[in-house]
Amino acid sequence: MVTFARSDTTMTLSEQITSAVRSVIGTNPAALHEPLFEGDEEKLTRECVETGWVSSVGKFVDAFERGLAEYTGASHAIAVTNGTAALHVALVAAGVGRSDEVLVPALTFIGTVNPIAYCGATPHFIDSLPNAPEIDIEALEAYLDGILELRGGSAFNKSTGARLAAILPVHVFGHPVDMDHLADISERYKIPVIEDAAEAMGSTYKGRHAGTFGLLGTLSFNGNKIITTGGGGAVLTNDADLARRIKHLSTTARVAHRMEFIHDMVGYNYRMPNINAALGVAQLRNINNFVLRKRILADRYAAVIEKIPAVRLLREGNDTQSNYWLQTLILDEEIADQRDQVLSALNDAGYGARPVWRLMHTLPMFESSPRMDLSGAEGMAARIVNIPSGPALVQL
Amino acid sequence: MVTFARSDTTMTLSEQITSAVRSVIGTNPAALHEPLFEGDEEKLTRECVETGWVSSVGKFVDAFERGLAEYTGASHAIAVTNGTAALHVALVAAGVGRSDEVLVPALTFIGTVNPIAYCGATPHFIDSLPNAPEIDIEALEAYLDGILELRGGSAFNKSTGARLAAILPVHVFGHPVDMDHLADISERYKIPVIEDAAEAMGSTYKGRHAGTFGLLGTLSFNGNKIITTGGGGAVLTNDADLARRIKHLSTTARVAHRMEFIHDMVGYNYRMPNINAALGVAQLRNINNFVLRKRILADRYAAVIEKIPAVRLLREGNDTQSNYWLQTLILDEEIADQRDQVLSALNDAGYGARPVWRLMHTLPMFESSPRMDLSGAEGMAARIVNIPSGPALVQL
């Protein structure tokens, strides 16, 4: 336990938060997120080297895909080079193309939005809740009522004339959005859902894994995620035709043939290498342990943070179980101006802490993209502080 | 040694070639190409797992990039996820964009041409020599004289109106093209050269490494290449500004900042993970050994193949030193109709053998792309048989 030199109430906000973090994770420096390798990672990667099977075909790719499908409950999982690639190929497979618009949160990582640009489509930004980073589905519903018209079974933006080709919800920091409500909207407005579950491996909504509700869903296994393959991602789907199409698109669209190299469309070189999949197979064996540790960490943080006025830890919503990928402090509006001091104090103390990503609609390449009122996202973005979240911060 | 049941001359062509291959590499099955791990691959990948540094930042990425620059003599090397990604980001950095045309061989792997499509540009196909798979630069020169006009310092296709934004030579099977001649054309016609040296790591032209002549050059470290990182590629350049731009583009165009995530353009998630770079560092330590083995293999194959009438092994051209990535038989025209029998016989005997890639202009997505007369490439494509080429086929 940490002994406070002064009583909590006379400490500055930065001091209180830093002390609270210290009381949970100790005095050692801690990154924002670090992977934990205490299973078969070394053994399985060694096996790749010993057998020579390190590249884009190999048993670990197949095993990882089977393991992902089994763990998430998706019928099909296709492993690719990263979460951005997963989303890109998902959008292509869903038919998103030039001059389409894709509804996407302003509050997300760039990897959600760049694939829309790769397709030649335009992001159409949607707002977050006033008190949580996830999308504000009620506000979205009202907005779509105003801007949208249905023609020939598709939704079009009345003012730009563009087709609204997909809605791309993001389970921000691992917290699933209200998928039932979103499914209603998707059906009513004829806009397919493609879920960005990059941050939500291990999270569920009504007992069902994030990324398995939409037409397609995507995962990420970047080094900062709950499980990692070095770099990696996956597409989930319950649609066998789409699964075949995704696999085809991500393997240079090569047509099966004993010797000939024939390709029947513009494809991508997005296949996950076997050595990365070997890491993934080992990591996946421990995911329940990682989720448990991160949920305990959330409880511990919450217990000390709730004693600090005007600050709260973001907790999972109704009907959801979060993997608590990134632990998230939310400052009340009246102390939002102290966010940067809090961030500096935490980092100065050796604790990896970060504000949320710069909102997408403020980046130069997306400045002129269409959008709804984004005051929810703007309010949230000013008040978020992510704090150390790695599974190793809790010993079981 | 293999004992022939009949004299060579009474054997079919397929039998003669299969026997010749057997006499060089023995009776065990052999893949077309396999990597060889007999150095520090296991040690360095283990170090990644032990330290937790497996992802897109880490000391092996830096070390691999330095090693690539040193080995090739390029001022800068940027490691990315694969050769396709390398070429894509090179084209973007060189300013290739929508409605441009890029001159590219019809005889190449799909990974050369897809990145042109990713840029929204159109491949403009060029021919191969009548007796070697590399591009026919003299025929190209005559062709460009006819179709091209210079305006404002750039070359335009008179008939389509499109800018000819780049020429993309490929060092097919590891054999460097005549870069002096190509440099003349590039300068005269104001078309920058971007070299696809995916197959040519370890090959030189006039003592200088392939991929270091153009504005930009690219490498591949796929599992079938002379050195592998599982999946991987790199961009080479001597231009510091372009190197910075490539690094920026391949790392989501994130602007340097202590904590904030700010991106200033549409970028890509193409950074090579550290665990793959660890493999690369280990492989690179042995590359001279691999090149030597593959050059010895070429000599051995040549010695037996030259006894077979109307068949030859593709040898390195004047002023070049080849890595002999894929050993290549070329059948004379009069026996080209036996190519498929030869391929079947070799594969049936357990030897990985392959025809050349289906020519790019015959694939459905590129059928309507502009092209010069491609009779050289078409003639070559009918006559090529690649045979087992891995470095492990020669013991030093």
Image (spheres, coloured by chain):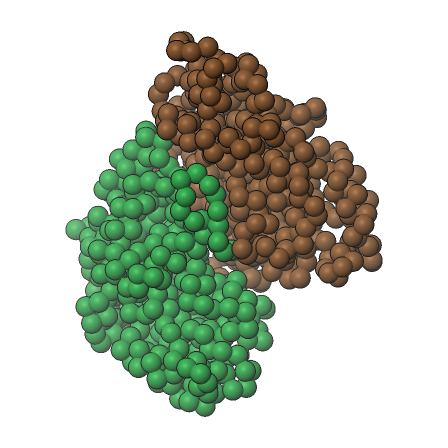
Chain colours: A green, B brown
Q: Residue furthest bottom?
A: A146
Name the image quarter holding residue B69: top right
Residue A72 or B102: which is nearer the viewer? B102
Name the image quarter holding residue B369: bottom right
Q: Residue furthest left?
A: A396
The quadrant of the rendering that contains the N terminus of chain A is: bottom left
- On the picture, is A88 further left or further right than A322? right
| Vertical arrangement, residue B154 with respect to residue B394, above or below | below
| Vertical arrangement, residue A386 with respect to residue B280, above or below | below
Residue B362 or B272: which is nearer the viewer? B362
Q: Is residue A9 visible?
A: no
Residue ID at (36%, 31%): A52
Q: How many marks?
A: 0
Residue B130 or A214: which is nearer the viewer? B130
Residue A28 or B153: which is nearer the viewer? B153
User: Percent from the top left, x then y, of residue A313?
Assistant: 29, 69
Q: Is residue B385 visible?
A: yes
Residue ID at (46%, 10%): B7
User: Percent from the top left, x then y, of residue A263?
Assistant: 48, 50
Residue ID at (62%, 37%): B379
Name the image quarter holding residue B138: top right
- On the picture, is A1 further left or further right than B167? left
User: Percent from the top left, x then y, of residue A379?
Assistant: 43, 78
User: Percent from the top left, x then y, of residue A350?
Assistant: 38, 53
Residue ID at (41%, 67%): A94
